[in-house]
Image: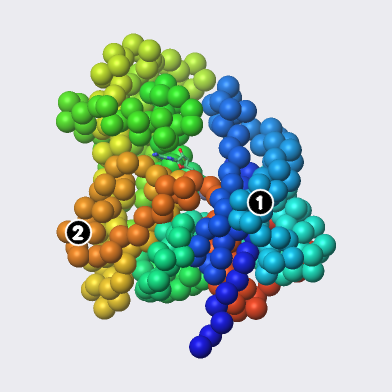
């Protein structure tokens, strides 16, 4: 019988969340502490990198402390220190990576650098109680990452191995949500606010917004056309050109019902595009004789009410298991990093203390 135990502390600071988590055996979350910076960025309508790094410096030690206390473990009991070292804002990534290196060096424990995008796809296999970890995650799977920076489909053959099938050619779906929220003046953070607004609207009360499916066989995504279509629908036709361009109206001229209906129409189009591409990927994989055993979903947009509803419905219609992350690990968190790092730990695949921070994902 193979020994599969591990106790891993992971740290995360790639964007505007400072997080630390302890996970046992790659599956069981013992603690999942997340300090969000939303309040610091709200007046700018987006993440300000300098403010983000400064806040990570202030939060990282208290967050680690809390994660260790909640898990009820000591530093000596840990088997490894994991950290998200890519992708993200360089100044932000550096904070968790520096803290993780210091801990690994001081404790004499292995350091494991984790790709944040790959970890998002692992989040659906995390559980809150050991009893729920009885079933081994099945592979191959079709992986869908929907986040602020990524909209990708993958053929996933193990926790650590995946091949990209499709990618966005312009905006990521989360980024489109954030921009649509600005256009509709729906508040900050954009994605969750727009989701909430959309739930109060009726998509059929307005003309549908266009979904770009690209070529017939393409598994890529495109969201810039949808964003522009919403902009024109809200503001009317542009008048003038270049920096002098003005619009006929603004979101302030819409009634609350019109705003909610447009938000719902945007949500239908944005999520509709994802569902169509997942179906297309399943069809293509079946034609190639590599039908997946399940569909894994991850990334911040996996918290969206409509994607959760429509993915589960798709799973039922195709007789395929759809694995969504628990809500506590949809957005940026360190538990997904600790879980994934277990597989590297078991393989004895560690990083040196000169582990770099990298702005882009390797996935
Ligand atoms: O995974 P994540 O926390 O960070 C990245 O790795 O990018 O994803 C953040 C993205 C943001 O664009 C945010 O607006 C979006 O996820 N998001 C949502 C919802 N919750 C978060 N988008 C739509 N509906 C939501 N409920
Ligand atoms: Zn993320």
Residue 162 vs 259, above or below: the answer is below
Q: Mark 1 points at which residue?
A: 69
Image point (57%, 61%), residue name: 23
Image point (40%, 44%), residue name: 303
Find residue 135 and name its label: none
**For this rendering, which residue is in front, 2 or 192?**
2
**Local crowd size for mark 2, using a 10 Å CA cut-off: few (<14), some (14–19), many (≥20):** few
Percent across and percent down for residue 336 are: 53, 58
Ligand 1 within 8 A of label 2's CB? no
Rounded to the nearest whole Å, what is the CA distance between mark 1 and mark 2? 41 Å
Asked whether the viewer can see residue 217, the reply is no
Question: Of discs 1 and 2, which sits in the foreground?
Answer: 1
Q: Residue furthest bottom?
A: 1
Left or right of residue 214: residue 61: right
| Colour mapping | rainbow
**For this rendering, which residue is in front, 30 or 206?**
30
Indicate the secondary structure of the residue bearing disc 1: helix
Percent across and percent down for residue 177 are: 41, 36
Ligand 1 within 8 A of label 1's CB? no
Left or right of residue 14: residue 198: left
**For this rendering, which residue is in front, 312 or 355?**
312
Please identify the quarter of the rendering in which residue 116 is found.
bottom right
Image point (46%, 65%), residue name: 130
Left or right of residue 308: residue 319: left
Q: Mark 2 points at which residue?
A: 316
Image point (45%, 31%), residue name: 190
Percent across and percent down for residue 184 are: 38, 23
**Local crowd size for mark 1, using a 10 Å CA cut-off: few (<14), some (14–19), many (≥20):** some
Percent across and percent down for residue 77 are: 70, 67
């Amino acid at each position: 019988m193979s020994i599969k135990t591990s106790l891993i502390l992971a740290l995360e600071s790639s964007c505007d969340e400072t997080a630390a988590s302890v996970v046992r055996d790659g599956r069981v979350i013992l603690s999942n502490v997340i300090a969000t910076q939303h309040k610091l960025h709200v007046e700018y309508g987006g993440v300000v990198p300098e403010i983000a790094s400064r806040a990570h410096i202030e939060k990282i030690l208290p967050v680690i402390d809390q994660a260790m206390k909640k898990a009820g473990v000591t530093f000596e009991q840990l088997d490894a220190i994991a950290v998200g070292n890519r992708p993200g804002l360089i100044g932000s990534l550096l904070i968790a990576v520096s803290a993780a290196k210091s801990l690994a060096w001081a404790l004499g424990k292995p350091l494991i650098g984790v790709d944040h995008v790959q970890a998002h796809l692992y989040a659906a296999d995390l559980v809150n109680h050991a009893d729920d970890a009885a079933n081994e995650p099945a592979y191959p799977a079709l992986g869908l990452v929907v986040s602020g920076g990524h909209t990708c489909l993958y053929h996933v053959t193990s926790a650590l191995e995946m091949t990209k099938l499709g990618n966005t050619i312009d905006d990521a779906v989360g980024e489109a949500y954030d921009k649509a929220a600005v256009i509709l003046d729906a508040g900050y953070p954009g994605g969750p606010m727009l989701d909430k607004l959309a739930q109060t609207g009726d998509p059929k009360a307005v003309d549908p917004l266009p979904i770009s499916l690209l070529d017939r066989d393409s598994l890529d995504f495109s969201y810039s056309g949808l964003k522009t279509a919403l902009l024109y629908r809200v503001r009317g036709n542009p008048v003038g050109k270049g920096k002098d361009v003005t619009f006929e109206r603004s979101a302030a001229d819409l009634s609350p019902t019109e705003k909610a209906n447009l938000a719902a129409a945007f949500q239908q189009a944005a999520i509709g595009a994802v569902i169509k591409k997942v179906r297309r990927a399943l069809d293509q994989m079946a034609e190639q004789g590599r039908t997946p055993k399940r569909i894994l979903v991850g990334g911040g947009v996996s918290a969206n009410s409509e994607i959760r509803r429509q993915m589960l419905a798709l799973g039922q219609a195709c007789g395929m298991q759809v694995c969504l992350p628990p809500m506590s690990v949809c957005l940026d968190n360190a538990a997904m990093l600790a879980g994934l790092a277990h597989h590297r730990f078991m393989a004895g695949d560690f990083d040196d203390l000169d582990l770099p921070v990298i702005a882009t994902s390797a996935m």
